[in-house]
Amino acid sequence: MEKPLEPQGRFITFMRLSIAQLLLAGLFVSVSYATSVSGQEILEKKISLRLENKSLKTILSSIESQAEASFMYSPRATRADRITSVNATEKPLGEVLTTLFEPLNLHYRLVGKKIVLSNSPTERMTGVGIDRNLEQLDLIDRTITGKVSDETGERLPGVSIVVKGTQRGTVTNEQGTYSLSVPEQAPNGGPVTLIFSFVGYLSQEIPVSNQSTIDVTLATDTKSLEEVVVVGYGSQRKSDLTGSVASVSEKDFTQGVNNSALQLLNGKASGVQISQSSSAPGGGIAIRIRGAGSINSSNEPLIVIDGLPGATTTSISPEDIASIQILKDASAAAIYGSRAANGVVLITTKKGTKGKPQVNYSAYLGVQTVAKRMEYLTTPQYIKVLNDLSADQGGAPKFTPDQISAIGNGTDWQDQIFRTALAQNHQLSFSGGSDNSNYYLGINYLDQDGVVLRSGLKKYNVRLNYQVSPSDKFKVTLNLNTNRTLTDNILTTNSGNENAGPINTALQFDPTIAAGKDASGNYPFNPVISLENPLALLYGVDQKKVVNRTFGTLSADYEILKGWTTTLRLGGDIANERNDNYNSTITQKGLSSGGIGSVGTGEDTHWISELFTTYNHTFNGIHQLSILGGATLERYDSNDLGASSIGFLSDASLTNLLQSGDGDRGDNVSSGRLSNQLNSYLGRVNYTLKDKYLLTASIRTDGTSRFSDKNKYAVFPSFALGWRISEEPFMQQNNVFSDLKLRLSYGQSGNQAIGNFQTLQTFIAGGKAVLGGGLVQGVEPARIPNPDLRWETTEEFDIGVDFGLIKGRLSGSLEYYSKTTRDQLFNKPLPTTSGFQNILVNFGEVQNKGLDLMLESRNLVGDFKWNTNLTLSTLKNTVVDLPDFISQILTGGVGFTSNYALVQEGSSMRSYYGYAIDGILQSKEEVAASAQPNAQPGHPRFVDQNGDGKISPDDRVILGSPFPKLIVGLTNGFSYKGFDLNVLFTAVQGVSSLDNNIVESLYPINFERNRIAEHYLDRWTPENPGARYPSGVNPSTYGGALAVNSLTISDASFIRLKTASLSYAIPLAGKKVRSASVYVAADNLLTITKFLGFDPDANASGNGVERASYNSYPLNRTVRFGINVGF
């Protein structure tokens, strides 16, 4: 058995006890109360309050409860998360506020019954009542009205409007409008001036002349806005970030029928490529962050949900997510060590907020159709093409006139398996909170029928987030998610079993055969083409998958001293899965075996315990220091059990009675159990000088049970520097840049995504031998172990600039990165004399480099608003080094095509490798002069690369790359008086894919299979010498090993109208409904591409690096009608 890291049993026992204790602590909730008093009494009201080392936000909330006051402020501009203290006994509120705010350089004023916080000392008030200077004013004789908006035209509630030199003023209401009575003259006898101010915006002074209406647009004070971004084991102000972090909030998510939270990022973050490996309900999602660095191991990023690493995005409701951060460079991601080589995705779910309970309900109904069908030969075309091909090959017509007449219109098999399908989604959430607790409960139901008959998915999800502070220093947080997913009949595969599902057979099946059953009650098939009837596979194969998953974290935070907090976090993830498959006697395969049934079950568990401490302190007002240190312990366990049998008496029982099968013919049972452990120590330091000069350094040490004692531990350091140039004195007078920051970073991360026991000698069941007069089960070595295996290591250098222009109207970032992955974990081929095919070793080096650009522009402001967001990424992937013992590696397999992906120095990883075609042979003379003496006119002309007069494997060249050169996402948003229109285009350019459907069309396994129409309607004939495609005559002579060529490696570039939505916010007449909107949206409306398959973005290789199309589930075009209501 694999040797785990210590401790082991004590960790599990400790975790169980701690979970029980913290759950009990989480049961206590405090409830706040409030009554109202008049505005003039507020600052005179006496309060008693003693709070030590609490956030400003917490203190203000306590004051609101005691003094029956209401504060108006921006948490970001006032830095409400700052730690401070207050100590008052029966003191007037005005005196308490003065004492509290002076050290924080904050000021306040009373406007009506609200206390408005400000950073401007000219607006400060020290008491209540009417300024004595008012006595010198003339009688008030007129009223000024108007509205206040930001630069986008959005109305601003809570803006302070004050008559300069007095304490007379008001605030804008929820609609951003105001009404204020003003005197004829100011106290000094001059004209009256109004001061408009709001936290986070630049104040304006506007003189009042004869106008009665004054509308104002306030400009954003970008220096006061401090967006907080979640990073590993904490959060930072966005302005203080030194690493490459892309942040996407809920309002920017890509909406749709999303089965995975990763789909929310489509087109929203530069350097991030989201591909849907299958469009089936519950289909897989592949995500690549700045390319792929591992030849043989996983290239998927680490997913962290509310602090739980290794979580899955398919078992969480996208509606429960508040924001997603992508840690793209090694500096930002290195704190996660050995699992961060491919980047880190941090998902933060929604939390409750202080205030009365809120109820939100959202729902949509979607109508799904196949976005694009593959254009195969219609029945009349099929008949003509086969008759013509038969004649061209010297044979008799395949179909006689009488047969053609009897066939009629034939059958479009895509019509038989595809349908218009419905999808519905319902989300109900409850949230709220008080001074010392908050909660969020989300309930989601998704029901999606597939566009292929009998396929579909049902998903149930419940999330509970709860936080309570039993005392000022102690906080408990619970994040819990439970999910149940049921999937039916997603019958696709990339293996050579072309009868694994109805999609592939529907494309190639004989269109002259009528749909439905024959006189014997069976689905007819053509034995010549060795394909099952698509309807037999559709109704004769039953496949069901059920996954139950519960995961979450429970954490306790204790403030030891001011600014010093220690956190204990426990996490768990338990998943149970069952797969049932039954191939009935309706299918030819099932009939020959008397029915085939199998059941597979599995359980995966993941436990994590983390203890870390953070210290934050500001020295002399200019030095800000944050220190993090901690340790984590994780354990993964999995077990599986499978059973199968054949030869059942009846199909009725499906997989419910496997024991009723014919055990002598095919019973099979298998089982397994695996575990591994990860032990880590981590630290990080953030230092800021004068809010201008930034330094971040981190280090993490990981130890895994997957490696031997020689290389069990590895260290992953990083550092980063930042310079906020816009804060320098020489930049204060510039009118171009509102923000400018330069970033530089370097870091290391690792990859230990290999199987268990690779460094140990293990054994598997072997053959049986006769011992003692009986058969005895034998064992044999499973592999040659390699105790010298070590971690893959990725080094990354990143330089970037963040900027804001034209007073924040245009903002963005531009980055250059270079990422190198060394010590690749790869299977080295072994000679046959060893008895094994390969051994896992470390070798090789792969580099990814490119540019990431993000732009956000507010093009038009006012009542009609137009915003644009652009993400653009370039990528170059190169194999830099391979060992001397191997110059190139050939891999890849899909359908009946293999060895098409090349790993070779100087080329991109897993480049497509095959034969170049530069035309079609036109005559016998050209054939005789070519390197293909056995070819015929009309056959493709292969390029003799080495000029040796023959076409051989030595003539293969690189035909394309699976890595796109350019990825673009472009979002435009328009809004006008409650209407919002959002349009997202995505584009992928410079990428190739192996299309196995083209392989089987150009080089059919047998004559009577259907083919792609374009290939044969524009095929070479003596009458059509300028055709694009070969003649199709005797294709086996130019297929087989030559099938991977310029025709079958396709350009998979595309431009797609990914989503378009139009919503309307309903004006509310009653108070019971807080908000309401309706919308219509469409997904995958238009795709512009040369690709012939269902979807250029699909990948039959799943999450593999190389891209291939085979038996892929078609892309869905969906129109959704939805509603959002808040109470």
Image: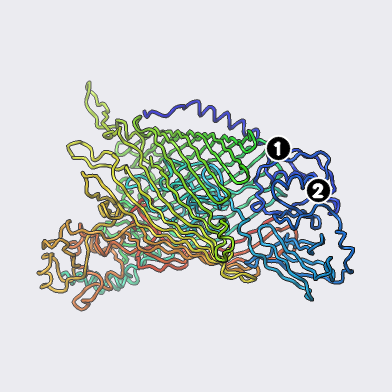
Residue 264 shown left or right of residue 862 in the figure: left
Q: Quadrant of residue 948?
A: bottom left
Mark 1 is surrounded, within 10 Å at the Cα level, by few (under 14), some (14 to 19) or many (20 or more) other residues, namely some
Provide residue 649's location: percent of width, then percent of height.
Answer: 37, 42
Can residue 673 be seen in the rendering of this structure? Answer: no
Numbered mark located on residue 268 in the image? none
Can residue 637 be seen in the rendering of this structure? Answer: yes
Q: In the structure shown, which secondary structural element does the residue marked by tag 2 occupy?
A: helix
Q: Quadrant of the N terminus?
A: top left
User: What amino acid is at disc 2?
Assistant: Gly
Residue at 66% over, 58% down: 200
Residue at 51% over, 47% down: 346
Of pointers 1 and 2, the one earlier in the residue sequence: 1
Residue marked by disc 2: 94
Q: Using the image as rendered, state which of residue 488 and residue 32 is in the foreground.
A: 32
Q: Quadrant of the C terminus?
A: bottom right
Position of 551 relative to 120 (above/below)? above
Provide residue 690's location: percent of width, then percent of height.
Answer: 58, 49
Residue 225 shown left or right of residue 543 in the figure: right
User: What amino acid is at disc 1?
Assistant: Glu
Residue 394 shown left or right of residue 476 in the figure: left
Provide residue 509's location: percent of width, then percent of height.
Answer: 31, 62
Q: Quadrant of residue 920?
A: bottom left
Residue at 55% over, 51% down: 692
Q: Using the image as rendered, state which of residue 617 and residue 1066 is in the foreground.
A: 617
Residue marked by disc 1: 52
